[in-house]
Image (spheres, grey):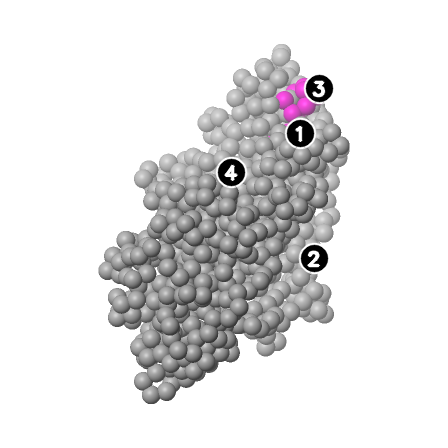
Amino acid sequence: MYSFEPSEEQRMLVDAVKRYAANDLRPAMRDADEEAQLNMDLVEKGWELGILQASVPEEYGGFGERSAVTSVLAAEEMAWGDLAASLAVMTPGLYVLPLLLAGTEEQKQELIPPVIEAEWKPYTAALLEWKFDFDANDLQTTAQEDGDAYVINGEKVYVPFADGYEGMIVYAKVDGKTQGFVVPKGAAGVTVGERHKLLGVHALPLYRVKFEGVRVPKENRIGGAAGHDFAPILASMWVANAALAVGMSRAALEYAIDYAKEREAFGVKIGQKQAIAFMLAEMATEVEGVRLLTWEAAWKLDKGKDDFYKHAYLAHNGAVDMAMMVTDRAVQVLGGHGYIREHPVELWMRNGRGFATFAGLAMV
Amino acid sequence: MIDFEMPEVIAKQQYLLKTVADNMMRPVSRYYDEHEHEIPWDYIEFMHTAMKASGAGSLAPSEGGEKKEKKDRPRIGYQMLAFMIEMLSWGDAGMYLVTPGGGLGAAAVEATGTPEQKRRFLERFKKEKPAFAAMAMTEPCCGSDTAAIRTTAVLDKETNEWVLNGEKIFVTAGDKSLTPYEQLEPGFVVVWATIDPKAGRAGMRPFVVEAGTPGVKVTKLEHKMGIRVSDTAAIVLQNARIPFDNILGSPEVITDKKTTKGFKGAMSTFNATRPLVSASALGVARATLELLKDMLKQEGVEIRYGLPRAKMTNIEREVIDMETMLREAWLLVLKAVWLADQRQPNALTSSMSKVKAGEVVTKITQKAVELMGPLGYSRDFLLGKWFRDAKINDIFEGTGQINRLIVARQILGFHGAQLR
């Protein structure tokens, strides 16, 4: 039975995240971006909202079960406040969710509770590589069997909070397939390199990380000896990316609408001109359309539908273009003022381009 | 709870309609396209019999039908209708418009009529022979600017009749609704007219004009770019007299010329029907995309999902973008009709769905012809026909531009005078 109505529980969570986004994240967004520094107290506050904890069953230290739909709703609201901080709050999910989705019982019992039961800590994952046509299903980083271990070699980029990481999932190619490996803190051969300087999300610490002959025990392969299917993990990354894009784009849309209702030109509000009004109408239509696309993909993930992978990809594909279109036009609606850093729209536009690259920085 | 599971009753309906589309529509699609104004009686009679057997007399979700549903079961009438229209339009968008049962005319009566009017006007759709009804809004002077219409309705107090004068054009199924074909029950047209030309919107009212009314004449059938099997009529009303009770909605509001309630009530009909037009558009879009993928497959081209854009072929990129926009538009339609079933306001989502669907169906059909090169442009396949059929969806039931205006007014909180 079709329904577009979140449950009572989801509404309560969304309301809490909305308040956090509006009262904590948004006011701190500009300074965080200028100083390339997140306020980690705010990240901790976001962590305490318990979005990830609610995705984890009690036996692994959480208090719920995984619902991609619920996480999408939360991610959307959070990204409305600030994308960089949202990605930070969601970073431990990059470590927990693959284990939850594909880990062995032992892996779940041993590795998840220390993350879930504590305060926010830099548990993270390394997927992206330094290639213009980076393909998550065709990695350069390799893991080779050697006795009772896998040996990982390669270089990763855009690894959140790699500096001082507590635990990391590293994706590498095994027999032509992408597989995740748990790399513990302090593993020999892991070298955290420079922090990236990027077009957007300045506040989020992302690093290059080198893996040179990094030996991890065989039981550190997600799913154990048989390994795991990467598709649900990648699909979850696409959907998370789409949800964040929707939330941030909605922020840009709302800002542009407010501006168009205030700013006057030729004796009327600029929103009274069709040239502006039509742009806004198309932006609103795209935000709503991609939002529904994302909800449906998340729902398919939760239900394990046969076509979840395709739909997750379509949501990601739609979100990449929607975010660029909406944030670009938000700047356009503000005209010269949009180009000035006193307004947030230029920041959103710089972040907006990032969704083409960000799949892999969050999961739902 | 957010849910995207298709109800079983819709799945069953779609299964049946797919066989109708495959067997009754596709095989004759090209024939009727090339024989404009020939009437597909086989299809009409089949659909009438089938709808009667299933208890659905009219295409509009009727109150009677809903009463039959158990009270604890959620309403899904508009959702079923959207799916039905999508599938029939997947078969042939022109023939879908030749489905008996009242179309937009019946929908207007459903949305704004009194119980007595509904009984009087909608009964005919349950009779032995099929019947049609139509909506007449556009005039030679004006289409999108509906408040400027010139057709007048003057009350003759002596006979208690409305006297209608004016000319209507672009009336979908106007011919089948008014002309006395022996295969059909007499139909009706919902004619928009003003009871006070100086009052603008406030004077606008819908009137039910029955077939056979003296002074009502079909004067022309248009020759169109596409959807050629569907008749598009011009109608002249010359001192056409209709009973007082044929004005739709409560007759009380007519005494207060300052209110635009009558106009707005009528406009709310469009909120209900707009996503249904979007659904029709997306049926054509899906048909096109499916045929395109089949043709590509025959040429040995498989679409790979999940690649970075830098690794895709141009065709993969185009097809995946088409699939993305089609799904996005369909979900907007689904939300709009779901809201209608929930009896929640859906003007914003309805217009969004129309903006998106009109754009998506034109883009997809145009791209498909382009991508298939000489094959696409050839009449050996239906791609070119669908290209022609598609374009009307960005025009009728509110052009893409009118719907952008409606969306913009809603999100900006401006009324019509502030954002023209």
Query: Crowdedness of circle 1 by 10 Å Cα count: few (<14), some, many (20+)?
Result: few
Is residue B390 positioned above or below A192 on the image? above
**Is mark 1 in CB contact (under 8 Å) with mark 2?**
no
Q: Check disc 4 and report its element: helix, strand or loop.
A: loop
The amino acid on which the numbered mark 2 sits, given as a three-letter code, is Glu
The amino acid on which the numbered mark 4 sits, given as a three-letter code, is Asn
Q: Distance between the residues labelled 1 and 2?
A: 46 Å
Q: Is residue A44 left or right of residue B220?
A: left
The amino acid on which the numbered mark 1 sits, given as a three-letter code, is Gln
- Image quarter of the C terminus of chain A: bottom left
Q: Check disc 3 and report its element: helix, strand or loop.
A: helix
User: Do dots 1 and 2 share one subunit?
Assistant: yes
Q: Which chain carries label 2?
A: B
User: Do dots 3 and 2 share one subunit?
Assistant: yes
Nearer to us of marks 1 and 4 is 1
Q: Mark 3 points at which residue?
A: B198
Q: Which chain carries label 4?
A: B
Residue that sits furthest to the left in the current view: A59
The amino acid on which the numbered mark 3 sits, given as a three-letter code, is Lys
Q: Mark 1 lies on which chain?
A: B
Identify the residue shown where x is 43% and y is 75%: A190
Say which label, 3 or 2, has the lower sequence index: 2
B189 magenta-colored: yes
Q: Mark 2 points at which residue?
A: B34
Say which label, 4 or 2, has the lower sequence index: 2
Front position in the image: B417 or A57: A57
User: Do dots 4 and 3 share one subunit?
Assistant: yes
Say which label, 1 or 2, has the lower sequence index: 2
Identify the residue shown where x is 37% and y is 56%: A120
Q: Name the residue under label 1.
A: B418
